[in-house]
Image: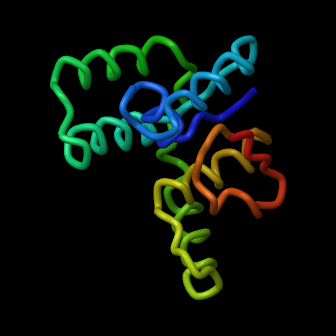
Amino acid sequence: MIFLDANFLINLYVETNNEHERANEIYNLIENEEKIISNLVIMEVITVMNIKLNLDLDLISEVYEELNIAYKILNDATFYNKGFNILKRGFNRNKERISLFDSVYIALMKDLGIEKIATFDDHFDNIEGIVKIC
């Protein structure tokens, strides 16, 4: 079982991104594992593709459809408060702030016993009990 972070998925689906080839290699390595995302991952991926990357609506729609059928989707609403607590604890301790999205993903993974995450985000490097595979 492996959690797929939004930045991993964006690199996987957007061929012009720097880590696209690496994301494909990793995806092939985890092909037989159960791949898990959450509702927030879908929201984050689509928002970044639309607002930050300004991608074509056809690609955004294609990715949205794929995210909704290709992966096990967890309802993450019950983890928002735990995620916010993680964000608050790390607020003054870390050089780089962690997003609420990622804080919720950490809370979700810890509570559900998901130990692996596919991500290119460095702030997942030192999270106890979570192994980054990118």
Q: Is residue 112 left or right of residue 118?
A: right
Q: Is residue 103 left or right of residue 128?
A: left
Q: Position of residue 35 (x, y in %)?
A: 64, 23
**Rendering quarter of residue 22:** top right
Quadrant where the C terminus is found in the figure: top right
Q: Position of residue 131 (x, y in %)?
A: 79, 47
Of 112 and 15, nearer the camera is 15
Q: Position of residue 99 (x, y in %)?
A: 47, 63
**Residue at point 25%, 49% (across, down):** 52
Q: Position of residue 110 (x, y in %)?
A: 74, 50
**Residue at point 36%, 32% (across, down):** 16
**Residue at point 74%, 40% (across, down):** 133
Q: Compared to 12, does 92 lie above or below?
A: below
Of 18 and 9, nearer the camera is 18
**Residue at point 65%, 85% (across, down):** 93
* Farthest right residue in view: 129
